[in-house]
Amino acid sequence: MKAVPQDILEDLGAQIILGNTYHLYLRPGHELVRKMGGLHKFMSWERALLTDSGGFQVFSLSELRKVKEEGVSFRSHLDGTSHLFTPERSMEIQIALGADIVMAFDECMEHPAERERARASMEMTLRWAKRSKDYFEAHKHECPWAITSSENQTHNHRGHEGTQRESASDTVHPTAAVLHDSMPESIKTPALFGIVQGGMYADLRRESAERTVELDFPGYAIGGLSVGESRAKTMDMIAAVLEILPKDKPRYVMGVGYPEEIVQYAAMGVDMMDCVLPTRAARHGLLFTSEGRINIKNARFAQDQGPADPKCACRVCSRYTRAYLRHLFVSAEPLAGVLNTVHNLAFYLDTMRSVRHAITLGDLSGILSGSVSFT
Ligand SMILES: [Zn+2]
């Protein structure tokens, strides 16, 4: 998470964050993270962590990448060194990082793509899903915090060695989950999610979903969306896949979206989403508010005494004026990125709290009609 300390994320109510496998593999390296006790301990985050497969960043950031049946070879965007990501290598790296949710290695296809290209890519993603699962099942106990039945029942979830050492850095956060032998096997080791692909073709999407479900994962993601297609197309693809994916397993749409989008997808039956939008937009001075999206650098905010969002109760809105946030931003003060990010995260997390509340009440119509359109 750029620009926001972990304790503020906890105060905001963030339950899970995402680690980028590609970036962590290149720097500081997954073996270093493993030696530090895994990503939870390394970054002092006791709540849930998900890592992506590394594939998306390889396709979007690296140079001279070449896709073969074996995997994807590429050059680092940092120093030009050559690397190879395979399904097995992606699992090895993610297990070393020690996320709670590990993603299968899939091909992130270009958009737009012809039907035959989309089918071939979908078929390879299915073969890679099988290879991912085979490697994962054989090695998931090597995760830094994995609990095997022979270990002490009171050991802490996050790297049990830490509970026996005295240094300040090993202080166990009060939210740390303590797992016991009586708990199901599935929460003593990471969970591997499969990924549905198939481009912008509903029948390929459905076939991908059916065959991914046959491989039997504890959760399923829908990848390759929000890559430049229309919002209507994104919704069509999600709807087609949701017909197939089991309702009693987490269903995760990767890489979305605007606040009103995540409300719509949640109403359709999506359980999880991830996006750089709230944090990246914040660093560019774009704030999501109950009145729509505002650009804080705009001159009209120069003497605005109001908060970023009059309906937001976050620590930024209850303390700072738009005038001050604008001053920080136009002066390129690092605090601008921090405060803008904290507010945007508060707005997104409030949005999802409203969605969960509406689901509990059994009525999403209010939140759907009341959601602000930003595009
Ligand atoms: Zn706020």
Image: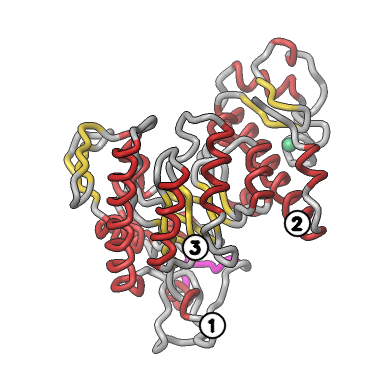
Amino acid type shown at disc 1: Met
Q: Which label sits on residue 155? A: none
Dot 3 lies on which element?
loop
Q: CA–CA distance between discs 3 and 1?
A: 19 Å
Whether residue 304 is visible, yes or no, is: yes
Amino acid type shown at disc 2: Ile
Please provide percent x and percent y for residue 211.
39, 60
Q: Is residue 309 left or right of residue 197?
A: right
Image height of 284 relative to 156, above or below? above
Q: Which label sits on residue 219? A: 3
Whether residue 41 is visible, yes or no, is: no
Dot 1 lies on which element?
loop
Residue 169, magenta (yes or no)? yes
**CB contact under 8 Å: marks 2 and 1:** no
Q: Quadrant of residue 128?
A: bottom left
Q: CA–CA distance between discs 2 and 3?
A: 20 Å
Please provide percent x and percent y for residue 161.
41, 75
Return the residue at label 1. Answer: 183
> In the rendered view, how is the structure colored?
secondary structure
Front: mark 3 or 1: 3
Q: CA–CA distance between discs 2 and 1?
A: 28 Å
Q: Which label sits on residue 359? A: 2
The range drawn in magenta is: 166-173
Residue at position x 49%, y 30% in the image = 229
Residue at position x 73%, y 46% in the image = 350
Name the residue nearer the viewer: 314 or 171.
314
Instruction: Say whether disc 2 or disc 3 marks the residue closer to the N-terminus.
Output: 3
